[in-house]
Structure formats: C-alpha cells, structure tokens
Image: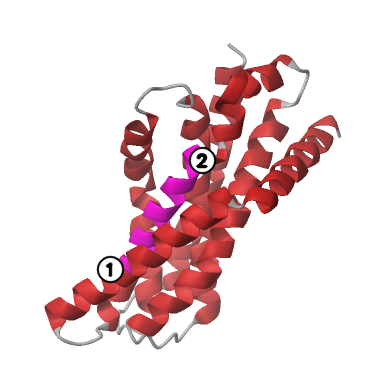
Amino acid sequence: MKALDDYMAVLVKDLRLEFRAREVFYSILLFSVLAVVILAFGFTWVSGQRDASYAPGALWLTILFSSTTGFNRFFDREKENSVFEGILLTPISRIGLFLAKVTGQLIFILLTEVVFVPLILMFFNVNLVMPWLFLSEVVLGTIAVVLVGTLFASLLMNARVRDVLLPLVVFPLSIPILLAGIKVSTLAFGAPLAEDPMKWLLFSAGYDIILLVLTVFIFEKTVSL
C-alpha cells in the first residue's frame, strides 16, 4: 500500500507540473512530427510514390527517436538543486518512484503517438488491415522503450554528456522490440507474409515483462547505494 501511495503521489505531481508547462509534451510532439515529415518526403523522393512498405520502419524509428528526446527532459526538474537526491533521502518506495516516472513518460509519449501515427498512415498511404494488432504492438513497444529510457535517464542524470550517452544505451536494448514492431506493423498493414503475427505480439509482451523486472531491480539497487 505504501508503494501504491508513493506511486500515485509522484505521478500526480509530475502530471500537474507537466500539464502546466507542457515542455516534455511539446518537445516530443515537435520532434516526432518533424521526423514523420522528413521521412515521408525522403522516402517519397526516393521511390517517386507513396509506398506503404516504408511505413513500418518510419513508424518505429519515429517512436524510438521521439521518445528518447523526452527522457532527459522529464528529469530536468529533479536535477535542479539536487531535488532527485532529496527525494531519495525520504522513505519513499523506490519501486513506486520508478513506476510513477515510467507511467508519466508513457502517458505523454502515447499522447504524441495519437498525433503522429495517423500522419504516418496518411503520408505513406497505408491500408490498416488489423488495427487491433497494430495498436497492441505500438503500446507494447512503447512500454519497452520507456522502461529502458526511464531507467538510464535516471542513472545518467548527472552525467555531463547524458544527451549523447542515453541514445547509445537505449537504442541497442530497443533493437528486439524494434524488430518485432516492424514485423507486426508490416503484417497489420496487409503485407502478404506467411507468418503468425501473434508470435511477435507475444514476444513483445514477454520482452516487456523481462524489462519490467530487470529495470525495477536495477533502479532499486542502484539508487539505494
């Protein structure tokens, strides 16, 4: 119960601060929309037409890159005046603190996806055959990226080159979910592939569970040192 109370307290605090300033939301949204436009016009220029086969790659690259831009920004307030260290000195639940940060990041990234995912479907002329499969994979993939990004954003908070180090850590660990996301999206867009999409969806769910256990364990042990 204490972990749940701490989780709700931190989450409500973060949501109130962000909805007042909207710094994280606007930065992720602006980057994602620009990325979609650049990728759309770039692929259109190469192929000479709006080819839906480029959509899965463009989608997941946008999710990965735009998410990474928001991770450090979400901890900027805690970095000032050593606020995060002060929070850790309190008897707050480490698990509740970490999951609250993950949930806050996830909410804002999903909100931006509501904007830029339809843009990708429109720009690349995508015919969405299995929307439930596509939406499920987008949510599962986003959760995986947010878990990894939130963990290392908190650990690298005081690093001088954290904006450089964070992508170097997050991108390799996101490769499995990136591959699964591209495969599921390709099938959801109606590509004639003789594969079972549920296999990849279950892989994404299992990868999320593994990351959840590992990131919670690493965060709890690291911040307690």
Rendered residue at 32%/42% (across/down): 172
Identify the colour scheme used.
secondary structure
Circle 2 SS class? helix
Question: Which image quadrant is residue 126 in?
Answer: bottom left
Q: Is residue 220 above or below residue 105?
A: above
Is residue 73 highlighted in magenta? no
Circle 1 SS class? helix
Rendered residue at 34%/87% (across/down): 125
Under mark 2, the amino acid is Arg
Which residues fall within the magenta stretch? 58-72
**Label 1 environment density (alpha carbons within 10 Å; few <14, some 14–19, many ≥20):** few
Rendered residue at 56%/34% (across/down): 75
Relative to residue 71, is residue 189 drawn left or right? left
What is the C-alpha distance between the residues marked 1 and 2? 23 Å
Residue nearest the observer in this picture, 196 or 151? 151
Which label belongs to residue 73?
2
Q: Residue 195: x percent and y percent?
A: 35, 74
Which label belongs to residue 38?
1
Earlier-in-chain disc, 1 versus 2: 1
Is residue 71 highlighted in magenta? yes
Residue nearest the observer in this picture, 143 or 194? 143
**Label 2 environment density (alpha carbons within 10 Å; few <14, some 14–19, many ≥20):** some
Give the position of the C terminus as an image quadrant. Answer: top right
Rendered residue at 36%/65% (across/down): 34
Question: Which image quadrant is residue 178 in?
Answer: bottom left
